[in-house]
Every structure is written in structure tokens, then in C-alpha cells.
Image (cartoon, rainbow, N blue to C red):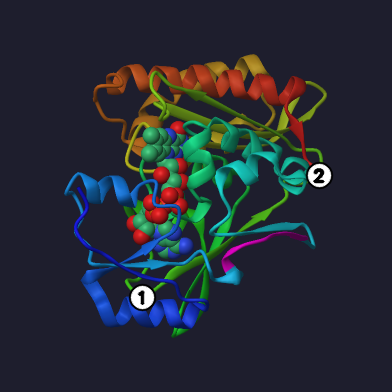
Amino acid sequence: MLGSLQLLQPTTVDEASGALRDFAERGKVYAGGAELLLLMRHGLLQSEILVDVKKIERLHGIVWNDGTLSIGACVTHHTLETHPLVREHAASFAYAESQVANVRVRNQGTLGGNLCFNDPHSDPGTVLLVHNASVTLGSQRGERQIHLHDFFLDVYETALEPDELMLDVEIPSLPSGMISAYLRLHRFQRPTLGVAVAVKMNDGTIAESRLAVGCIGPKAQRLGEVEAKLNGSSLSDAKRIFAEQKNYLRDVLRPVDDLLGSADYKLYMTGVMLGGALEQAAQNGHKSD
Ligand SMILES: Cc1cc2nc3c(=O)[nH]c(=O)nc-3n(C[C@H](O)[C@H](O)[C@H](O)COP(=O)(O)OP(=O)(O)OC[C@H]3O[C@@H](n4cnc5c(N)ncnc54)[C@H](O)[C@@H]3O)c2cc1C
């Protein structure tokens, strides 16, 4: 059961940030509530004041401008999976959004809520890393832009300051000719493993690649060292390279044993699924514009 709660509905970032500053620990940002209300119902989080940010116009909208897709933090997963601009300019991201949970959660949950909660078992962040996405954070003190890679700090930890809101997410298009794919492994609704790749092929060899893996450790990560090793390789060489890079993958991804599987199993499946995603991208993945 939830105790009594006060709901504030600010219409500006300034007002919302002021409320967060004034109420400090007693106040929490409330977007779709998919995570927040569950935690409160189970007594895992106490809050007296919910600062509902959905009435702030700045946090809505999907705009394509100068090679970058800008998405308001309060846009829901369902809108993202179906929106023509997202499907055209970030097709694997739209696909990843279609895989989130179930239609109820996708209608309720927002992109900002997903990224700010930073549950390791999430889909969108992994694909967004392959796009080199960044987020804009805002408070009464002004706005700042930060790469998503630096925004994710650790399990459920982000670079958000207590009085800050996520305003929007900027998603640059992939370089011309690069093709992307996202694959996920799941036994329950939340993913056990998610891999995102983008690749540019040249005469059957990899000219350029981007790889990201999420869910098996504390946070989603790019695999810069493996990306460099793939240049000039064929797709079958790439599979061998993934198997050889097991120690690097373990160091970067820090896989954990849990009810979804052992760390060794997750690491093995990471190599298998990266190979599969590269193959899918090279054959029939989603082309950037
Ligand atoms: C049953 C279930 C299954 C799920 N399965 C998946 C899955 O398969 N894949 C996946 O990726 N996710 C999954 N999720 C997670 C889901 O995507 C997130 O719960 C949802 O996106 C959170 O968004 P929200 O708007 O509801 O956030 P809320 O619950 O409102 O907020 C979540 C957190 O983010 C903070 N917050 C929200 N918006 C902002 C903002 N603009 N600025 C600053 N802080 C903010 C809140 O204060 C809170 O701490 C699942 C969730 C459930 C309940």
C-alpha cells in the first residue's frame, strides 16, 4: 500500500528543479511511474512528494535536425517504437524499444525514466551507446550536455545531481553506410543480455564497427578495444576475435552470476550474440540514412 503523497505538477524545468532542491530527500521526480511506484509499493523507496514532470513541454517531442534526433525525456517507449522519424533515423533503437517489457509498460514508461533509473537489465541504453548518444540535464543552475557513456555510473547510479532533470536525449545518426542491429536474450520480460552493433562493410571485410553490450554487468558498455581489432576482418574472423577477447570482455563488462545465469554463460553468449548481430547487420540490418 502507498501512504499519502503530495503530487506537484510543475510546467517548467525551473519550477521542477526548485521543488527538488526545496524538498530534497522528501521529493522524487515522477514520469511514467513504472519503476517508482513499484519501489514505493514494496517499501524500497520512501517519498512524500512526487514531482510529476510530464506537464513540462520541453520534455516532450521528437525532432530531427541537422543529422541528430532529439527526443524529450518524457516520450514513452511505445511512441518511440512506432514513430516514423525514429524508425527512419535510428531503426535498431526503434526495434529495441519494441522489445521493452510488454505493451502496458511501454505505454507507461518513458525513455528518461529508463535511463535515469539505470537498471542494468534495460534495452535502450545499449543501442544508444552505439549511436554515441548524449543527454541534456537541466536545473535552476542551467543546462549541461553529457555523453550517455559518462551519464551511466554504476548499478542504479547516474551523473544526475539531486536538483537536476533529464530534459532530452540527442541521438546522432550513424555514419553513412553503417548498418546496425540489436539482439537480446531473455528468459523473463527484462533482458538477460543485449548486444548492439553497427558496421560498415567493404568487399566482405569490416571497415568500421561499433559494439555495445548491456545487462550482464553493472552498466551498458562500448567495447572500444574489440572494435579496433575488427577492422579489416571478415565476419568469421570477427567470431574468432570475440572468443579470443574473453578476458577483455570480462574486465570491461564485469558479468555477474545471478538467477538469469552464470557469469561464464553470459560471457560465452556475449561472443555468440555479437557474432550474430554483426552477421544480421551486414546482411539485412537497418541502414542509416
Ligand atoms: C514489469 C517490467 C518489465 C520491464 N522490462 C523492461 C525491459 O524489458 N527492458 C527495459 O529496458 N526496461 C524494462 N523495464 C523498465 C521500464 O522500461 C522502465 O520502468 C521505464 O522506462 C521507467 O520509466 P518511467 O517513466 O516509468 O520512470 P519512473 O518510474 O517515473 O522513474 C524511474 C526513475 O527515474 C527518475 N526519473 C524519471 N524521469 C526523469 C527525468 N526526466 N529526469 C530525472 N529523473 C527522472 C525517477 O525519479 C525514478 O528514480 C521494465 C519495467 C517493468 C515494471
Residue 276 sits in which quadrant?
A: top right
Residue at x 57%, y 63% (from the top left corner): 168
Which amino acid, by three-letter code, is at mark 2?
Ser
Residue 62 forms part of the magenta stretch: yes
Residue 89 in percent (x, y) is at 75, 46
* Mark number displayed over residue 176: 2
Residue 5 in percent (x, y) is at 26, 64
Residue 248 sits in which quadrant?
A: top left
Q: Which residues are magenta?
A: 59-64
Residue 113 in percent (x, y) is at 44, 53
Residue 148 forms part of the magenta stretch: no
Residue 184 in percent (x, y) is at 51, 25
Disc 2 secondary structure class: loop
User: Quick one: quadrant of the C terminus?
Assistant: top right
Which amino acid, by three-letter code, is at mark 1?
Asp
Q: CA distance from mark 1 to mark 2?
A: 38 Å
Residue at x 34%, y 16% (from the top left corner): 265
Disc 1: which residue: 163
Report the side of 164 relative to 129 (left or right).
Answer: left
